[in-house]
Amino acid sequence: MIPKQPQTTDAGPIALRMTGISKRFGPVQALSDVSLVVRTGTVHALVGENGAGKSTLMKILSGVYQPDTGEIEIHGRRQVLANPAQAIDAGVSMIYQELDLAEHLTVAENIYLGAEPRGPLPFAVSHGRMTAQAGELAHRYDFSIDPSARVESLATGDCQVVEILKSLRRNASILVMDEPTSSLSESEAKRLFEAVRRLRSQGLSIIYISHRLEEIVDLADEVSVLRDGRLVHSEPVAAMNIPKIVHHMVGRELTDFFPSRTAHIGEVLIQAEGLSSDAGIDDVGFQVRRGEIVGMAGLVGAGRTEVARAIFGVDEMTAGRVILEGRDLDIGSPADAIAEGIALLTEDRKRTGLCLELACSWNITLPNLGQIGFRPFIKPGQENRIAADVGSRIAIKWSSPRAPANSLSGGNQQKLLIARWLLANSKFMIFDEPTRGIDVGAKAEIYLLLNRLAEEGKAILFISSELPELFGVADRILVMRRGRLVGNLKTKETTPEEVMHLAAVEEKREG
Amino acid sequence: MNRFVRQLLPFGTLILLIAALSALEPDAFLTAENFFNVLSRSSVNGIIAMGMTAVIISGGIDLSVGSMMAVSGMVAGLIMTKVTGVSPILLMWLGTLGGLATGLLCGLLNGALITRLSLPPFIVTLGTMSAFRGVSYLMNDGMMFDVPAYTFLGQSTLAGIPVNVLIFLAITLAAFFILRYMPLGRYTYAIGSNRQAAYHAGVNVDRTLLVIYTLTGLFVGLAAMIATSRTVSAQPTAGVSLELDVIAAVVIGGASLSGGRGTVVGTIIGTLLISFLRNGLTIRGISTNVQLVVIGAIIIGAVALDQMARAKAVESR
């Protein structure tokens, strides 16, 4: 029983057919009767909000989970994938978001890990043959990479190439890529797209998971949309566009994706002058007013996060000053910054944001214990009430404030951090890539929240790599390039093209 | 819910053990005297384990506690035997304070080296483990100090309960309270769970760690005085390999050596489990050599069961 057969235009040979896949975890029906067809030599995008079932489906395909019902056919042969090794034998290869390489080994050693070519002596590995074979493999697929380079010396984009070569060495015919561009710079992403197209032309099938819909429209041949564990739509990309995809993902039109707002901009709250640090920012100056959302654009490595770190006391300032409400601040650590009413929502919520295995309520109150009267003693009952209260203000979905933070979806984890700074009653809030890696619905909620915070009179610095959201939310846009501020533009008086030009092109122009 | 089950497992084992021993050896085991004896013996390890619990929750380790205990006892013994011209009671007090202060300073030294030099706790305390032991041998040419009159902490009772058991109880309650109801405890969990995140949330990581290691030192000083009093002598060989027993108790109690996880209740259960097991096996006439093997198996078994429970919890997510 197949609910919705993919409508494909050309009937190329089928590389993968998953039929009627269902999977239940306890009370949660993660997948219901999902059928997916991927043709040979195509890029098949898989999209859906977080929790829609993408990763469960891919874990079934890679042998990590067993489906409760359903069948998997690979190149026409029925396969039971009882473990990851069987999936690899069947030609399925996963490239996860977090790359899985041995950093201290060379590119060749990683590619041939577990299948090293033997030398003349018993048990000995022939490094020469291994390096040569790795070079040949890279050459055959037109990748330029030094097989004897150590992985730790490579950029993220090249690490991905190593993962891809590892898969090719195992004769993979179906490559699953999970959010491959999330940690790549623009130019690295471009190279990756070229690589994906090359692999496709060599007859590989690529299942491409991404939140970045622009990429999908650009790259994929077909797109399948999962929602609430069901495959709701599958169609060639030619017949799709971004609004349509979003519509299928969220099941509603996102007319108010960027909520409209009448800004009530007040006096200057915070002013940075001549900010410099050893982390690579030089003479950065700007001001943010009450009720204003100031966006900050720039390419990866332009120094945006470093500006936030300098203001928040993580990096030491080598020059410059920060003036809040007319007072010169002396900030030596995040604790000092928080005491002054400054908040930083860091770009990496797993590394520098949350204590994942601790309770949601603990994460919310962590910087606020003194302020809510929990010094010297914490009152757990009251703590849960406070957390539940601030949580309900921004609609965090959790089973209870006592649940560990890692039981929440990405978007809700992000909201936990916002709840923390709401409770801290911060005056100046820096949001560093707050929508990275979260689904479309949660993004819209974050935008709404930014607006509400501004309406409450807070000053907001909103760092983002996605120009559409900067233009949708910010009143003013600062542009960073190579550690310097190169643009300070009113959103209404500029264009994405102008911002991108300032961010990416080397030329003198003062904003 | 799962955390509760995890907590229940060592507790259930402890209850089963006590029940089994009570049934097998009603005369030797199931007496108030034997119970107090076991608790009294547990007090030294147990008090140190309270500090170790906090250290392990913070993601660290303290290998120097055994040697630290020897130094603390030796300083107390030195004061009690070499200082002259004060009344015997005052001398006891001076010695006790000297022992406590020594523990505190040793802990402070560990904490300072870990935070100021940004060294891993394992390395720092491996070093001080050796250094403290050396100092304790140097203090009296490898000989012990006899302190025959120092019986209060180790051998007297209050309302029929050994004084050291009461102290053990008080320290346990204090540790429970700090870890559960005070910002210091909360920061300890946060640092162990994700040090970077704690720092970005305004936690003063260095100060918190300094306090935890110093407090552990103070607890060790207290345990040293109880141990000295139990044997009415301060011995430079005191507490050899004690750190391993203490770490074992904390780990059996459900703490994770990677930090962020552990409870005082769990550690108490772990401590008592080891103590009652030793006691029961001794009463049954089983040699200490066999006891070592059994305890080793329990450590591995407890952690293995824990891992399996976690793997399942992760899969059902």
Image (tube, coloured by chain):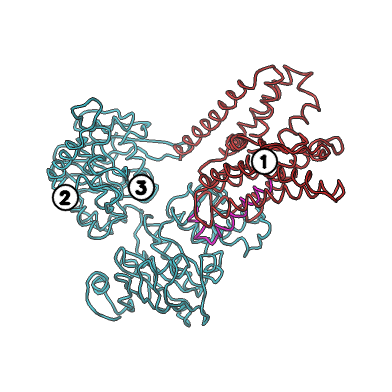
Q: Amino acid at mark 3?
A: Arg
Chain letter matching colour red = B
What residue span does the magenta drawing correspond to? B194-219
Q: Which mark is residue A443?
A: none
**Image x and y of residue A347, in percent:** 40, 60
Looking at this view, is A270 or A312 the one in front? A312
Looking at this view, is B203 or A117 the one in front? A117
Circle 1 chain: B
Q: Nearer the viewer, mark 3 or mark 1?
A: 1
**Circle 1 residue:** B70
Looking at this view, is A190 or A484 the one in front? A484
Residue A129 in magenta stretch:
no
Is residue B187 visible in the rendered image? The answer is no
**Image x and y of residue B259, in percent:** 53, 45
Reading the chain from its start, which is encountered first: label 2 or label 3? Answer: 2
**Circle 2 residue:** A144
